[in-house]
Image (tube, helix red, strand yellow):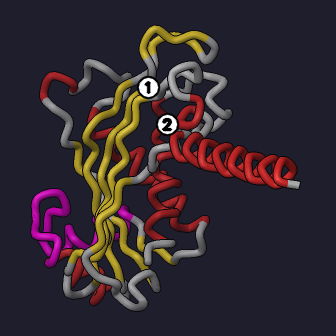
C-alpha cells in the first residue's frame, strides 16, 4: 500500500511539473504585434455621428520624396486619404469628404494643410454638422521592388491618424501604423496578419489600404 501511495504521489508530481512546463512554454509563444499603436485622450460621446476628413499631410523626409515611390508625396497622401474615407464609410460612419471640406475651407480662406485643427473642426461643425474630425500625416511610403512571389525590397508605409471632437477641436484618439512587410520565415505570427496571409509580397498600395482599414477598425472600436 505504501508503494502504491508513493506511486500516486510521484504521478501527481510529474503531472504538475508537466503542467507548469507547458504553461511556461505557452507564455513564451510570441504573439502578433499590434497593427495600430494607439493613444487615448478622451471618449467623446457621439463623436462618430458625422466625421469630416481632412487631407493627410505628407511629412516624408526630404531624402525620400519622389525617390522611393512612383507616386509623389502629395499624391500618396491623397491616396491614403481616400482609403481612410472608404474604410470609414464601410463601417457605417457618415463622412464629410476631404473634397467638400476643402471647398468650404477655401470659401472661408482657411488652408487645410497649414491652419489650426480647431479652426477646421469649428468649420466642419458649422457647415456640415460634423461631430468629429480626422487628420493624419503620411510619414513613409516606399514601393516594393520585385514581384509578389519575390521581392528584393518590401513595401513600407507609415502614417498617423488623429480623431478630434467637433467643434471644439479636442484630440480624443491617435493611431500610428508603421509597417515594413516581413517574410513569413522571419516571424510567422506577424506575417500571417497581412492580406494573403503573408504568402506574397504586397505592393505599397495594398499595404497602405490594409493599414488604413486597421486604423479605422481601431478608431471605431476604441474604448
Left or right, 116 with reference to 123? left
Tag 2's secondary structure? Answer: helix
Whether residue 37 is in magenta: the answer is no
Q: Quadrant of residue 120?
A: bottom left
Q: Residue at x 29, y 35 (%)?
A: 140
Q: Which residues are magenta?
A: 98-118
Where does the N terminus fall, quadrant-wise?
A: bottom right
| Residue hosting label 1 | 155
Nearest to the observer: residue 44 or residue 145: 44
| x and y, in percent, of residue 19 in the image | 67, 49
- Residue 165 visible in the snapshot: yes
Residue 97 is tagged as: none
Crowd around label 2: few <14 · some 14–19 · many ≥20 (10 Å): many
Magenta-highlighted stretch: main secondary structure?
helix
The vertical placement of 56 against 135, above or below, is above
Image quarter for residue 149?
A: top right
Residue 173, x across and y down, in percent: 31, 70
| Between discs 1 and 2, the one toward the N terminus | 1
CA distance for labels 1 and 2? 7 Å
In this view of the protein, which residue sits in the foreground, 73 or 91?
Answer: 91
Q: Name the side, left or right, on which 41 lies relative to 192.
A: left
Give me the residue at 36% from left, 26% from top: 142
Q: Residue at x 34, y 80 (%)?
A: 132
Residue 55 spot, x, y in % from top left: 30, 57
Q: Residues within 10 Å of mark 1 (few under 14, many from 20)?
A: many
Q: Are marks 1 and 2 in contact (CB under 8 Å)?
A: yes
Name the residue that disc number 2 marks: 207
Percent x, y of residue 104: 27, 74
Amino acid at each position: 500500500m505504501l508503494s502504491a501511495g508513493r506511486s500516486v504521489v510521484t504521478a501527481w508530481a510529474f503531472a504538475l511539473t508537466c503542467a507548469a512546463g507547458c504553461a511556461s512554454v505557452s507564455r513564451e509563444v510570441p504573439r502578433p504585434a499590434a497593427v495600430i499603436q494607439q493613444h487615448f485622450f478622451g471618449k467623446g460621446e457621439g463623436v462618430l455621428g458625422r466625421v469630416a476628413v481632412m487631407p493627410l499631410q505628407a511629412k516624408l523626409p526630404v531624402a525620400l520624396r519622389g525617390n522611393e515611390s512612383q507616386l509623389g508625396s502629395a499624391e500618396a497622401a491623397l491616396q491614403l486619404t481616400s482609403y481612410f474615407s472608404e474604410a470609414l464609410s464601410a463601417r457605417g460612419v457618415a463622412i464629410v469628404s476631404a473634397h467638400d471640406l476643402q471647398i468650404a475651407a477655401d470659401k472661408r480662406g482657411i488652408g487645410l494643410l497649414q491652419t489650426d485643427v480647431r479652426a477646421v473642426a469649428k468649420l466642419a461643425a458649422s457647415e456640415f454638422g460634423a461631430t468629429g474630425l480626422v487628420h493624419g500625416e503620411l510619414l513613409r511610403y516606399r514601393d516594393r521592388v520585385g514581384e509578389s512571389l519575390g521581392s528584393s525590397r518590401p513595401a513600407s508605409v507609415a502614417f498617423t491618424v488623429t480623431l478630434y471632437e467637433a467643434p471644439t477641436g479636442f484630440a480624443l484618439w491617435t493611431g500610428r501604423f508603421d509597417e515594413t512587410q516581413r517574410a513569413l520565415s522571419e516571424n510567422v505570427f506577424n506575417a500571417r496578419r497581412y492580406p494573403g496571409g503573408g504568402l506574397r509580397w504586397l505592393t505599397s498600395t495594398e499595404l497602405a489600404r490594409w493599414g488604413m482599414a486597421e486604423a479605422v477598425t481601431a478608431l471605431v472600436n476604441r474604448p
